[in-house]
Image (cartoon, rainbow, N blue to C red):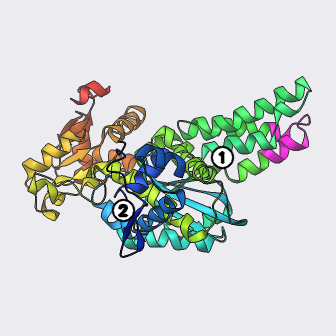
Amino acid sequence: MAVSASTAPSCNMRENGRRRYGNPPTNLVEEYFDSGSLTGLRQKLNLNCSEKTVYRWLVSQLRNYPTWKDFLPEMAKHVEFSYVMGIDTTVLSIAGKRCHYLHVVDFPDNHIAYEILESRDAESIKMVLLKIKALTGYEPRVIVTDRAKELLQAARDVYPKAIIQGCLFHLRDWLDKRLPTKKIGDPDKIREWDSVKSLVMRAALAIDYDEKNRYLSALQEKLLSKSADKNVRNTIRDFLKDADYYHPLRELMVFGCRPEWRYNNVCERAMKSVKDLSREMHGFKRLDLTRRYINAMWIIKMRKKMGFLSGSISEEKDSEALTLPLTLFTYDRYIDLRETARAYNISMDMLRSRIEAAGYIIAGDVAFGKDYLDIVMQKVLSDRPKTLKELMNLTSLDFNTSIRAAEALRLKIMYYSPADPQRIFLGYDRLVTNETDHT
């Protein structure tokens, strides 16, 4: 909202013979990012002073914004984590010096860390990830990143249990560079290269391992073909070396990774936002100020998402619900209700209400994510386990959770020995066969 000339901060005030400036707007930094330039900011707020003065005000307010390290613990209390992490880097020029910008996100839109590195080595990236882990205990189940050695090494060292998924955006970009069909004029070669690129992407996008292996076999055949040129052979060899980083969709969905997250588009857009900021500022001039601008930009975005600005956090009206972290409802697999209620001192009725509102399917004292339950159902339909023991082997679930999964799928459970899973038999006359049957 524009400020009238009569109330605008003035640069012409004097006191005791010395020049004195009026108080700047308290949200000057937020307004700057909205307007995109100092000139636009002066016009928007009708500031009757020089751009130099506005710049001094802006720099002064930038110092009031916390770093991502200071902000992250507070942020973690108010957002729902998916525990699917995206990591990416890009080159930044700051005062003519080549630097590297690292962005870390929790999908779909929780910006966790945004750091400028002097060197893009594994150790520097590892220190950022270790800091995230130390501040919040954050442990991703899936990490989406490109195949840069330093990113892969840092991710493996800090989060050895996480699934590392190759970024499909970078894979597609890599294929276009290795097999640049737009730069050649031979129709036969274009068809051959397009065929290889299609097979690689289909293998990376496969629904399950059977589909992936079919495309990998087709690539192996092309590799051995006498008609394959050097570019094709080198591209196939290099992809096959890293093919394990491209997991089938069904496997990723078990761990909460949505199909679109495999492209790491959130990080790509974040990189673009930082590049746009550099362009609006006609290039970054100082390392310390660049860090402050970038910190402020992402903290403002996260505060808007979290529903509070300038540090004023909206309070939760339900005091009992406040004791229950929102992150509990981001798992796509299952939740032990009794253990959760006991751990967070919340009633089972309140917990069930929150769980159902989050879209989970409740069976006894276990709640299952719909996506996970659908994957279990597909495995059950394919293998038709006859006993609870076979179901446990198929799903890697424990005794109690397997029983609850069978109940959620409406399998008929026949107890010939309540304690022996090999003598608890399953029937299929009531099996859930589509999503609507969950309700």
Tag 2: residue type? Gly
Q: Position of residue 226 (x, y in %)?
A: 91, 37
Please tell me in which quadrant of the rendered image residue 408 appears. top left
Q: Is residue 291 left or right of residue 47?
A: right
Q: Are marks 2 and 1 in contact (CB under 8 Å)?
A: no
Q: Position of residue 301 (x, y in %)?
A: 41, 51
Tell me: residue 375, above or below residue 15.
above
Q: Which residues are magenta?
A: 222-235
Q: Residue at x 28, y 56 (%)?
A: 78
Q: Quick one: 376 or 245, which is closer to the camera? A: 245
Q: Position of residue 290 (x, y in %)?
A: 56, 64
Q: Residue at x 32, y 61 (%)?
A: 76
Q: Residue at x 54, y 42 (%)?
A: 248
Q: Is residue 121 left or right of residue 319?
A: right
Q: Quick one: 376 or 146, which is closer to the camera? A: 146
Regarding mark 2 in the picture, which secondary structure is present there?
loop
Residue under pointer 1: 170
Estimate the spatial distance between the alpha carbons at disc 2 and disc 1, rounded to whole Å: 50 Å
Tell me: residue 391, above or below residue 149.
above
Number of residues whose C-alpha sits closer than 10 Å to that of mark 1, classed few (under 14), some (14–19) or many (20 or more): some
Regarding mark 1 in the picture, which secondary structure is present there?
helix
Please tell me in which quadrant of the rendered image residue 353 appears. top left
